[in-house]
Amino acid sequence: MGAQKKFRQLQRYRTISSALARSGFEFIVYSNSREAAAAANGAMDWDNAGKRIRLLLEELGTTFIKLGQLASTRPDLVPQPVLKELAKLQDAVPPFPYADVSRVIEEELGAPMSQLFRTFEPLPLASASIGQVHRAVLADGKEVAVKVQRPQLSAIVETDLDILADLARLADRRGSWSASYRLTEVVEELGQGLLAELDYRQEAAHLERFTRAADKMRHVRIPAVYRPYSSQKVLTMEYIQGIRLSDTSQLKKQGIRTRVVAERIADAIFQQILVDGVFHADPHPGNILVLPGEEIALLDFGMVGRLSAHTQKHFASFIIALRNRSSKGVMRAIGHLGMIPAEVDRGKLYADVEEMRTKFYDVPLKEVRLGEMINDLFGVAFKHRIRIPSELTMVGKSILTTEGVVAELDPDFSVFDVAEPIGKRLFLERLNPWSFLKNMLEDVPEYFQIASELPGTMGRLSAMLRKGKMQVEVVSPQLEQLVKKLDRISNQMSFSIVLLALSLVLLGLIIGSSISGAQTMLWRLPMLEIGTVISLLMFAWLLYAIFRSGRF
Ligand SMILES: Nc1ncnc2c1ncn2[C@@H]1O[C@H](COP(=O)(O)OP(=O)(O)OP(=O)(O)O)[C@@H](O)[C@H]1O
């Protein structure tokens, strides 16, 4: 590291440590204080700390504001009172001058402004802590919006992240409290998210992906990206003319039907979450434009969430269980989502899930906020120190923001009206034999792994038994659950194998009839009939056996 850089880092180190001390967070560095002890034994007054944390982050600038905004999407890492404060973080930063804008663009795109643009508005449309957006016209006449990153930002962010990682390690070495909040891990994870946001090429890739997905949604537009005019620090997009969703008086003036807009926004976001598996993580009103005919345009794909097919599937079941007010269903879905480690007291967890009943279950559906419900559930998870897959936490924030937006447009509209049919459709699709089989095949590697580990495990078990080292008493609910799960897996596998056999016979029948004509069919028919009858008998027997075992 150069001497100048080292000096800058030291200076910044001092600024950050003294700001921490002034805000009453010196215990992060000096662990033998009362607060450190309170944080360690879970008695920290987070209500009081939340506001101080927010002010501290705002004081320390871009890196910290952005980290705070990212943390506000993580109810699994941050206590609820702090989360509420973080959601208020403002990044209203004054714009940077046009001289810097043109310098960054010319350096990044390797050509003078006059060659790149026919016109370029020197005053930005909007400015935020990472960058600002200017309206322009390309040399070929296309109207564009150009997002330009603040100069020197990546160097500042990298220095700040290094310092933060150092502080977290220091806290980890000195006290037990930071370990229980996984401080080093949190800094690392949020830091990576922030660095990813600094690369506009990633946002460009997101825009392209969402454009493809939105093709099947008639009323949703995503700005096209102009790649030759984009780079790591410059993003050039198609300019979309529309009314900002936050401009309610203009919406009214243009006679926009707000209910329709609300439905389309909710539909677009739930379609992304439940069907596409990639979703806009921050659909706040500043990121949505309304066009004539109540079309909507989604902007700003810097923060995007992803769900694996597995999580998506069980998240849909989770929504249906919430809708049906079924605590058992909710617990089952959480289990499938892989959130409950073995050491959690399931009884207490169930009691906490049930407690949500008073707040959500016994009120009319219209008044239920799904995002709030999900976040409360994450709060319960936080309390039980349950690890929530990070992909899921962004969903809570995205839905919460969507609900806030649609409630402004139409207070009577419930996102369940949109989410539930999509969830049910997915659920029904899953019952279709082919997707059922596909799902089973997706899980096959897992079964093979269990199977491959089985001989070793059995070998060890029998050796222990031979040596008389083991006393077995089957009282563990987890073990019983495992047995049930294996039982269910084998039943499902047998079911799908027979289903496959049945489908192949039918397929043979169809192909046979279409290729060979009726005559050749005549001699094939008895064979097929015999096959079909055998498969049907096997199928009936299997169904009987499965239903008798009660585990499917
Ligand atoms: N393609 C576009 N067409 C028209 N206006 C746009 C376009 N892209 C951005 N804008 C305008 O610029 C504003 C800021 O854009 P965007 O949200 O992408 O920037 P940002 O720097 O990521 O801001 P923030 O982080 O605060 O959301 C938008 O609210 C919108 O008014």
Image (tube, rainbow, N blue to C red):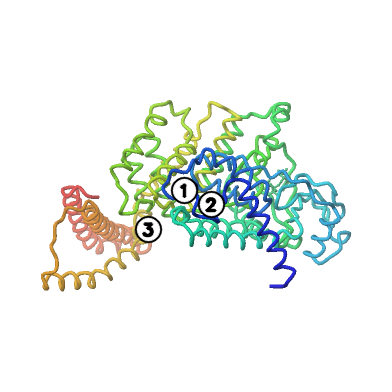
Foreground mark, 2 or 3?
Answer: 2
At label 1, counting other C-alpha atoms closer than 10 Å, the crowd grade (few under 14, some 14-19, many 20 or more) is many
Residue type at the position of mark 3: Lys
Q: Position of residue 369 (x, y in %)?
A: 48, 33
- Looking at the image, tell me whether mark 2 or mark 3 is earlier in sequence order: 2
Residue type at the position of mark 2: Phe
Label 2 vs label 3: CA separation?
53 Å
At label 3, counting other C-alpha atoms closer than 10 Å, the crowd grade (few under 14, some 14-19, many 20 or more) is some
Residue located beneath label 1 in the image = 39
The kind of secondary structure element at disc 3 is helix
The kind of secondary structure element at disc 2 is helix
| Residue at the image position 48 percent from the left and 44 percent from the top | 79
Q: Position of residue 493 (x, y in %)?
A: 27, 59
Residue 516 lies left or right of residue 543; in this view the side is right
Residue 250 lies left or right of residue 488; in this view the side is right
Q: Are marks 2 and 1 in contact (CB under 8 Å)?
A: yes
> In which quadrant of the rendered view does residue 163 lie?
bottom right
State yes or no: Cβ of the residue under disc 1 lies below 8 Å from any atom of ligand 1: no
- Looking at the image, tell me whether mark 1 or mark 3 is earlier in sequence order: 1
Residue type at the position of mark 1: Ala
Foreground mark, 2 or 1?
Answer: 2
Label 2 vs label 1: CA separation?
9 Å
- The residue closer to the viewer here, 92 or 360, is 92
- The residue closer to the viewer here, 246 or 517, is 246
Residue located beneath label 3 in the image = 438
Image quarter hosting the N terminus? bottom right
- The residue closer to the viewer here, 1 or 453, is 1
